[in-house]
Structure formats: C-alpha cells, structure tokens
Amino acid sequence: MSTEKAYELARERYAAFGIDTDAAIEKALNFPISLHCWQSDDLAGFEPMPEGLDGGGIMATGNYPGRARNGDEVRADLEKAMSLLPGTHRVNIHASYSETDHFVERDEVDAAGFTKWMDWAKKQGICLDFNPTFFAHPKAEDGFTLSHRDDEIRAFWIRHGKACRKIAEALAIAQGSPCYVDWWTQDGSKDIPADRWSPRARMAASYDEIMSDDSVDRTQCIDFIESKLFGIGSEEYVVGSAEFCADYALSRGMGLCMDMGHFHPTETIHGKISSHLTFMDKLLLHVSRPIRWDSDHVVIFNDDLKNVFLEIQRGDAWNRVILALDFFDASINRIGAYVIGTRATRKGILYALLDPTTQLQCYEKENKNTRRFAMMEEFKSMPFPAVWDMLCEKDGVPVGMDWITEMEKYESDVLVKRQ
Ligand code: RNT
Ligand code: ZN
C-alpha cells in the first residue's frame, strides 16, 4: 500500500540522520492530549442560566448546525471525534458541565454532578481533567470574581474554587490518575482602572484561601493558573496577567498554564517554556491559536505550534509538560474542528520527535552554527507526511483526509437532527 511504501522511504531518510521513526511514532501516540469538551457546545454548559448572560470574556462565533445540547450529545461528539483521532486522549470538562436533575449553584457543585462523565470516561478508558467556571454567571457579570471588591461575591467564588478541587480529587481517585485543574478567571476591566493594585491583592488572597485546603490531596488534584492578556470586556486590564500568574505560581509552588492565544499578537510562547521550566517543575499548555482579538481559533500545523514542541524536544521536557486543547469555532462542523485541531497538535508532537536534536546541539557546542542553520532548514522538507500517515495507519484511524467522509455521515445522521 502507498502509506507503507512512502513510509519505508521516509524511514530510511530519517535513519540516515540517526532518527528512529518507529520510536517517534510510538512516543507521539502515547503522549496524552486533553480534549476540551467545550468545542462541541460552544461553551454553553448545562446550567439553566438567565437569558442574555454572556460568556464572560470568551465567545464562540458562528451558528453551524449541530451544537450539542446536553451531556449525552457532548459525549457522543467527543467519541466520534476520538474515533477519527490517533493517539491517547484525556477529556477536559468545566464545572458548568455538571449534570443534576435540580439546579446546583456553583458554590455547591460536587462530584455527584459528574457521575455520568466518570462512568463514560471509564468506559472509554480515558481520564478527565477539570476547570472551575468563573464566568457565564450572574455573580460574574460585572467582570470580577475572585478579585471582586464585594466580599460576599468573592467568598462565593472562593467556595466555588474549593468545591472544584474536591471534585478534581474525586475524579482523580475514580480514574486512578491525577486530575489536572486549570484556573482561569476572566477578571478585568474594559477601560483604564484607577486601581490595578487592589484586585490583584484580592485575587492572590482568594487563591491562597482556596489552595489552603489541605484535605485535598495535592498529588491527585494538580493545580495550574492560566494567564491572559485581554478578553472581551477586559481589553485594558486583566487581573490575572502573565506576570501575575507566573509570579503567583512560582511563589506558591502552584503550576502555571500558558495558553498559546493569551499573549500579544506577535508574541509566541515557545521561548518562555525554558524560562519557566528553569524554575518550575511542570507546565500546562493550552494549545490554541490567536488571531487578532481572538485567542481560540482551531489549532493548525503552523510554525508557532511546531516551535512549542521543538522547544520541549530540545529541552527533553516531555514529562514536564501537560497538553490540553483550548479552541472553539461554531462556524464549521464542530467534529471537524476537533479533528483538525487535535490532529494538528499530534502532528506537532511527532514533528518535534523527528528533530535531529542531538546533532543540532552538537553543532552548536562546536560553534558550527552554519551547519546548525542548514540542518534546521533541511529538516523542514524531510518526508514528514509519510511518517504522519503511518502513525494514523498504525493506530487504525483514517489516513489523510479520509476522516471527512465519516464526519459528513455523522453530520447528516446525527448533527442536523439537533435543530
Ligand atoms: C479563556 C481561557 C480558558 C477558557 C476555558 C473555557 O480565555 O483560555 O482556558 O478558554 O476555560
Ligand atoms: Zn485557555
């Protein structure tokens, strides 16, 4: 078959540089990527929320038919997507995806609301990750939560945070694997505040209080704080900026999450990985793609993505990085969005694993920087696609664009009936 033929040639080409493509495929397949549940339902969640409440600094645009409307539909979509994706997955859920027959306030959420998710995850043989939800709620409507000047509102969100860590611990115990928790707050303001200081002091104090709960096992519930540059309605000031979050994380021994979409438009995160990991143990990465004001376009196989994984490869930091996806596009088939974005991410991993790192670093040590440069350029036109196709074939998922037919079938059989 053509996949095999092309692969044999590619394998030889890489082998000539001492690179083992079989080993790279194996390693790339085993690296877990946490799929975000919110691409399937445009981040709506399952709570009965008052009309007109906005997403809180984030928004999925588009109205492609087939948005998932409940837990069963979200899970069905994730299953469909995973059937078309090579490799190991986890699934990332938000507190707002709790399923109960009566309304449960955010400060009272508990693991009981996630039994369907846990049962499903067990059946799928996957693990769950968790995100507290500090947005899309009446008590978040003025743009402040953990940094709110009103002590009662702040206390409400602190209770939410504490409840979420308990849920994460329960998920971890149920799945026999730690649950990674991502802490993102929308807090900030549209225009120039007169006081940037107090909200930051309050936010730090809130996190201190949430994290002070020692009854939660820190080896099971593993916390990461996510920074952001700006959001809709927080264009001028974000309390949890990059500096705030990195300094908080480092000073408290908490994890840091860098979202690829949360920096200045020309700023990329790959150079930051070695900086943070010089001082921190682990990093959570939200794999995403910024375009102008949006931080959540579907991930594609571009230089930004490759550079992130090349950095991890060149620092041999694969076991110090956790990968979760974070994008949402409601203007295209949502299963297609999952498949394109997740495949691109795993492609990035494989691409980096095929890097001639040892050789490049040797040239560098010997001051042969022209050779280093030439080799980096040369590797951009190595027969990478043949190795990628083999990875898909080995894992029993459609090679190339063959997945599209299945996506379209699912669209006509399932998605269009969701009107
Ligand atoms: C928002 C953050 C955050 C969210 C999810 C839904 O800008 O990136 O990670 O996208 O929590
Ligand atoms: Zn994110």
Image (cartoon, rainbow, N blue to C red):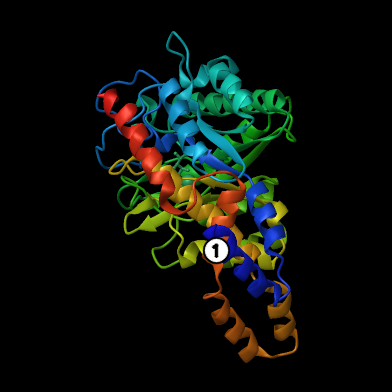
390 and 221: which is toward the camera: 390
Residue extending farthest front: 1
Name the residue furthest top: 102
72 vs 192, nearest the viewer: 72
Q: Nearer the viewer, residue 141 or 4?
A: 4
Ligand 2 closer than 8 Å to label 1 CB: no
Q: In the displayed structure, does residue 153 sit left or right of residue 62?
A: right
Question: Could you tell me if residue 205 is visible in this image?
Answer: no
Q: Residues within 10 Å of mark 1 (few under 14, many from 20)?
A: some
Q: Which residue is identified by label 1?
A: 386
Name the residue at 38% across, 26% down: 139
Q: Nearer the viewer, residue 109 or 208?
A: 109
Can residue 101 be seen here?
A: yes
Q: What amino acid does circle 1 point to? A: Ala
Disc tally is 1
Q: Which of the 4 image quadrants contains residue 356?
A: bottom right
- Up/down of 277 relative to 72, above or below: below
Q: What x and y, as percent, mark residue 258?
A: 54, 53
Q: Residue at x 46, y 14 (%)?
A: 104
Helix, strand or loop at label 1? It is helix
Q: What is the quadrant of the C terminus in the image?
A: top left
Percent position of residue 206, x then y: 56, 35
- Write the residue at 43% across / 45% down: 403
Image quadrant occupied by the N terminus: bottom right
Q: Measuring from the top left, give residue 313's x and y in whole percent.
A: 67, 64
| Residue 413 x, y percent position in the rendering | 33, 27
Q: Is residue 295 above or below residue 271?
A: above
